[in-house]
Amino acid sequence: MLIKNSPVSISNIKDKISCKYCDKRKKEKEEEEEEGEEEEEEEEEEKDYVRRRKKKHKKSVKSIRIKEEEEEVEEEEEEEEEEEEEEEEEEDFWLSQGKILWHFGKRKYREKDSQSPRSTLFCRFLRHTEEHGGSILAPLPQE
């Protein structure tokens, strides 16, 4: 029989007495817990990897879009430059032919165009403005 105030108690005795079966069970439980933790860590790592890949993909998609927009802007600028060069070449050609170009806003009119119905309206408008003293058209200087 155990004495109540003795330092030896049932719990102390149980801890000291061990059987192979109990030890084996404890080890298995610990291993299962460790494996569960490892699996959770692996799952978290996989999720993190997927998140990083998605972020990289989004960044790459954004960078591709930005590059495409920049290329479009460059192409538009090149087209505008080509149009301006063509206009200058046409202007130089008509000046070399001795035809007078009249500037009206951004549009340029040749003497030859005065036969079309639009140009007759334009000519009427010119006469009207010249009658009132406001000549808004000026011939290009001939070289």
Image: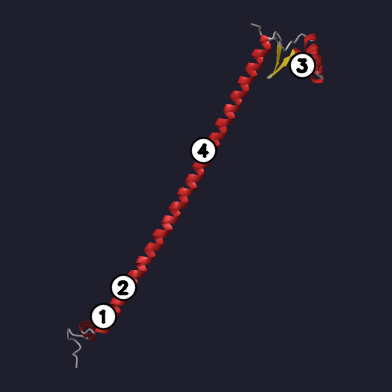
Relative horizontal placement of residue 47, taking residue 92 as reference (left or right): left
Closer to the chain start, of discs 2 and 4, is 2
SS state under label 1: helix
| Marker disc for residue 14 | none
Relative horizontal placement of residue 141, taking residue 48 as reference (left or right): right
Is residue 1 or residue 77 the one in the foreground? 77
Q: Which residue is mark 2?
A: 31
Name the amino acid type tagged 2.
Glu
Q: What quarter of the picture does the N terminus occupy? A: bottom left
Q: Which residue is mark 4?
A: 67
Q: CA distance from mark 1 to mark 3?
A: 107 Å
Closer to the chain start, of discs 1 and 3, is 1
User: Label 3 near label 1: C-beta < 8 Å?
Assistant: no
Name the amino acid type tagged 3.
Asp
Image x and y of residue 25, in percent: 30, 80
Q: Which residue is mark 1?
A: 23
Picture layout, residue 49 above or below residue 128: below
Q: CA distance from mark 4 to mark 1?
A: 65 Å
Closer to the chain start, of discs 3 and 4, is 4
Q: CA distance from mark 2 to mark 4?
A: 53 Å
